[in-house]
Image (tube, rainbow, N blue to C red):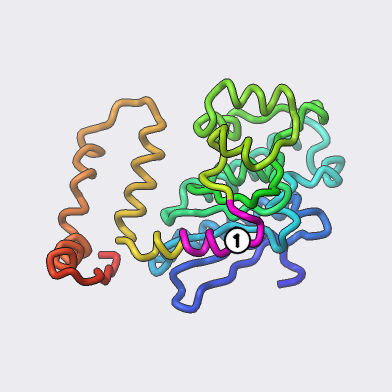
Amino acid sequence: MAGEAIFVERSGDGRIAHVVLNRPEKLNALDLAAWRRLAEVMRELDRDDALRCVIVRGVDGRAFAAGADISAFERERADAEQARIYAHAVHAAMESVSRCRHPVVAAIRGVCVGGGLELACACDLRIAGDTARFGIPIKRLGLTLAYDELRMLLSLVGPAHAAEILLEGRIFGAERAKEMGLVNRVVPDAEVMAEAEAAARRIAEGAPLVARWHKKFIRRLLDPTPLTPAEIEEGFAALDTEDYRRGVRAFLSKTEPEFVGA
């Protein structure tokens, strides 16, 4: 694992996976190979029916991710043609997180800037330490945020805050990030992982098909295209599942439901 830019750890029961960003010498800044590996890892986890939740985190408390590895730009992002290839890999990684069937929680400690903040935006929930630092200071590089990446930021914070983040390019703290809507909650640094794991356990205790449907429905409603009749009908699909029957029986008998994902 020491040599892997991205690796996965599983909980004892296999229901929660940690995707660990592991380039500590770069504050987990990701190069082209790491973005591609992240997409590959997330696609593998997406196919795992036993999984209930994913936590994305940095390998240590110094950083979630310091964005893209700028030291690699001269060989990987030197001109517009290379930039298109690079952007495709980044977009594929972000989409693999955003479109993963399973809920994804970002556990943010330390630096969370540039592409690291974009990655956090692709997650479903974001839990930050109180000294975490945020921003997208790419104005200093003479670089724009691609439309696909900007869309995720915009959906969280709206146009005014997105403009502030990109035009001012400043680094700001966790409380300001929470005010903007970038993070769900802020806890002491030492409690970030415990809080993320507690959130993941709460998610894992619920009906997994319902969690996947809710994630899908939220993403779909960000698209202004009118819902199709088939999509509206899908809103009732949960009532034909075994988990729905188990949930109702458990509620009536005042016991804990045991969901099977069917």
**Snapshot quadrant of residue 233:** top left
Answer left or right for 62 relative to 243. right
Residue at (36, 33) in percent of width and height: 221
Residue 86 seen anywhere in this rendered image of the structure? no
Q: Which residue is the extreme one toward the front?
A: 188
**Snapshot quadrant of residue 189:** bottom right
Answer left or right for 122 relative to 6. left
Q: Name the dominant secondary structure of the magenta segment.
A: helix
Answer left or right for 33 relative to 205. right
Residue at (41, 39) in percent of width and height: 219
Residue 141 at what x, y percent from top left? 82, 30
**Residue 208 sits inside the magenta stretch:** no
Q: Which residue is the extreme one toward the bottom?
A: 12
Q: Which residue is mark 1?
A: 191
In front of the other: 43 or 251 = 251
Magenta residues (range): 187-199
Check the image and report above or below for 221 versus 129: above
Disc 1 residue type?
Glu
Circle 1 residues within 10 Å: few <14, some 14–19, many ≥20: some
Answer left or right for 97 relative to 135. left
